[in-house]
Image (cartoon, rainbow, N blue to C red):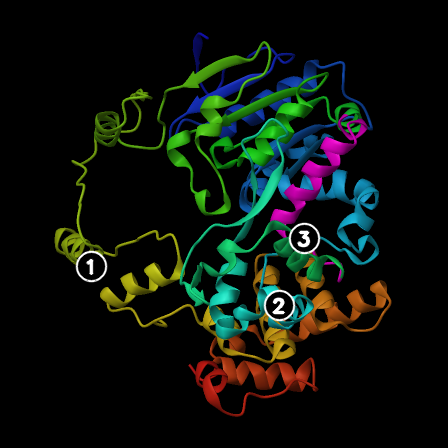
Amino acid sequence: MSITQINAESSVPIEQHFKVSAGPGAGKTRWLVNHIKNILHHSTRLGKTRKIVCITYTNVAIEIILNRLGETAERIEVSTIHSFLYRHVIKPFGSLISDEYGLNIKDIDGHDDHVVSLSKVNDWIKSDYRSLGYLFSDLSLTAYHLENLQWILKNNPQNSLKISVTKRKGQYSQNGRSFSFISDTKQEKLINYKKQYWRAGIIHHDDVLFFSFELIKRYPFILTVLRAKFPYFFVDEFQDTNPIQTKILEQIGQEETIVGIIGDKAQSIYNFQGADPLQLSLFTLEGIAEYQILENYRSTDKIVDFLNCIRLDLQQVKPGQNGNGGNPILIVGEMGASLRKAQELCHGERICSLSRDNITSNVLKKEAGVDCPSEDLLRELVNADSNSDRRKVILSCIKALEFAVEKRYREAIKELSKSLEIGNDKTERKKEALRHLNSILDRYAEIQEMNLMEFYVFVKSNIKDSLANPSRGRPKRVSEK
């Protein structure tokens, strides 16, 4: 297949599948927004009930695209893939398979991160103690494995899914047989663990992909509905797509709906969630056109030259307006030594670093002399606190507060109303959650200075007076940090 070179302002046919590859600073999002505007002006296939879908991977990216679309945004659905599938597949059609999987459709209200509930782990183990009783020997290791469960597309003609542990840690021996904890647990038993949540109306982000995939595979008319509602379906940052999402998108694009993807396989950052940058290279549909944007409007000329030396598959072009800049320096070596070398080269200037996780980030901060916790305290709290109610409420309040600070109020209210279990009526529960959220926000500056023990006291006094204080042992030590 030939590849056509375009730039951020180029127009391409609106009724043809497309794949756009572009490096950093190429204006990928700008091109996609311009393409959407072009469709809005020229397409005859849109209407009040027929919209363009634009999928991206973060709420920040959603806001950027919506702001750039301006008044036309009401004719486009901009969403994450999980939110889109939840809204258009699981909510309207989930009841078709709810009995089989014990899915409590009535009480489902969105999708959440998978935070392991030790009470649900205990219930799961007790339900099949003969097979799972050995997991009681180390509940923290069991929780670690369960936290890393993920649905994976099997490489077989049936395109079926399996649930698997993405990180392996620790062994257990029983009667001469070695177990790799959850890694060796049979599929039906892992699904029974998930059912502990599903029966309570809780589905996790990864479950959204599982249920959507199963529904579409069993009931192809769902694809007909999606195609009728969305004649154009675009995915930004496609390098962060996992194979399950790709398979769903390929099926949508088989008829009627025009599918477009845009990304850069070298910029994939969601491997830990099952993303596979090869999906960008392998993705194809009948008649798909392939494009490249080679300009780099972000980096200086010398940085572009350097990037082109280390990456041969996509040679970027200097538009001539970025300036020459200083010579870039690449430091290779141990993390702490690299940081000290950077400090030496920068002669005391402020240094910014990006890390994959909080632990690495905090180690770097410590190396740089910045006061910070030595570990991820929230993770330590989850592992240390055996009181599931207390743990759930504290984590919920912290997450709701951060959602609210980011102006994601709907998610903040949902987080509080679900975790605090206030009343039975959903409307009243949300009103009460909003009241509690206001009380947290009113004292945000004060809360920022609290340790976890002080935050416990605040939550107990202002939100849930039945909350038990940690009185001794590891939970109390963690909360006082």
Locate residue 249, reporting x and y percent: 63, 28
Residue at the disc numbered 2: 130
Residue at the disc numbered 1: 336
Q: Is residue 306 visible?
A: yes
Amino acid type indicated by mark 3: His
Locate residue 167, reporting x and y percent: 44, 53
| Label 1 element class | helix
Locate residue 471, reporting x and y percent: 53, 92
Residue lying farthest top? Answer: 2
Decide whether residue 411 is among the magenta residues.
no
Q: Earlier in the sequence, mark 3 or mark 1?
A: 3
| Label 3 element class | loop
Q: Earlier in the sequence, mark 1 or mark 2?
A: 2
Judge the density around disc 2: few (<14), some (14-19), many (≥20) Cα neighbours within 10 Å: few
Q: Residue drawn 33% across and 59% down? A: 360
Q: Residue drawn 63% across and 69% down? A: 129
Q: Nearer the viewer, mark 1 or mark 2?
A: 2
